[in-house]
Image (cartoon, rainbow, N blue to C red):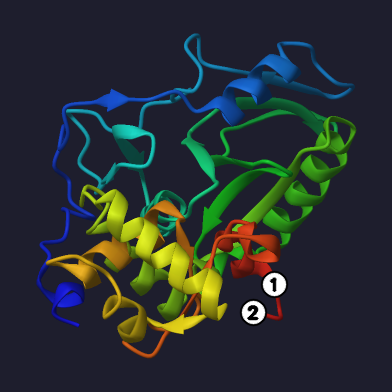
Amino acid sequence: MVGLLTACPPQLGTNSRYLLTSSPKPRPTLDLVRARLGDSPVDGLTIDWPPAFPDRMRKVITRSGTRRRYVVPCYRYGEREAHGEAAEEEAAFILLDACPGVEFQEQPARFTFQWCGRTCQHFPDLLVASNDRLEFWECKRAEESQDFWIKKRTERLLELLAPLHIGYRVVSGLELFDEGFLDNAKRIRRFAKHSVSPSSEADARAQLDLHGALGFQQLAEHLRSSSPTDDLMAMIYHGNVVTNMGIKLTRLSQLYTSCGERRDPWVWQLFDRDRN
């Protein structure tokens, strides 16, 4: 599968600024979230949003900063950069940008809430939205995620956000650095800009409708294309075909149409015990 090996990867995990000329597209699910929540506080919690949401409530990239920062180019909703302060955030950006059906915004809001008799502020790392699921994420190293006070803060925020039907999750490096998911996400992102012909997409759908599932190499051999493996990798990125992203992509990987249960965004499988 030459196409899996030769495409040049985007820059990842650098301190470089302005890797892209930003040309973001609307993120409709996030727009609906902001419109639904508005600025009304719930009892014990106020959520402040940036003036032009979706955008960052807090800057993490500054010209004078000496700490390492992470800039990840993202492609799913136009071209934009995701900025983070830790390798765990970088991994989350890569996974989320690689997953069809998911929208995300880093540094999305500021929480002001009552906890242990004090007024506290917190900037969650991410807001992650799909059609039926909405969560704030805080990305932590594995050992940090087990900290007593981190766990207690999580319990308090889950309690406060429950009336809004929004989740809050501490996502650890154990989940974000899962070898299968993260490696596959990096590989398919290399084909985000690859153009797939309508005939190649039609061939793939016809074969999968006929057989139900085919191995990667089997399906590639049925595509009328000069670059069938590149086409399939791009189709996986865009969600036209699906596979088990928790298992390393090979020429034997089973591919399916994006229908039925497999339509659910695969990134949520990071937190499922059963990844079948």
- Residue that carries the numbered disc 2 in the rendered image: 275
At 76% across and 27% down in the image, what residue appears?
113
Q: Please, is residue 138 above or below residue 175 in the view?
A: above
At 18% across and 51% down in the image, what residue appears?
14
The C terminus lies in which quarter of the figure?
bottom right
- Residue that carries the numbered disc 1 in the rendered image: 272
At 49% across and 51% down in the image, what residue appears?
100
Can residue 21 be seen in the rendering of this structure?
Answer: yes
Q: Which residue type carries mark 2?
A: Arg
Q: Please, is residue 174 above or below residue 152 in the view?
A: below
Q: Please, is residue 188 above or below residue 34 in the view?
A: below
Question: How many angstroms separate mark 1 from mark 2 (CA)?
Answer: 6 Å
How many numbered badges does the structure rendering display? 2
Q: Residue 155 at x, y = what percent?
A: 81, 50
- Judge depth for marks 1 and 2 and give the one in front: 2
Q: Residues within 10 Å of mark 2 (few under 14, many from 20)?
A: few
Can residue 247 be seen in the rendering of this structure?
Answer: no
Tag 1–tag 2 contact (CB < 8 Å): yes
Q: Please, is residue 141 above or below residue 28 in the view?
A: below
Quarter occupied by residue 48: top right
The N terminus lies in which quarter of the figure?
bottom left
| Circle 1 SS class | loop
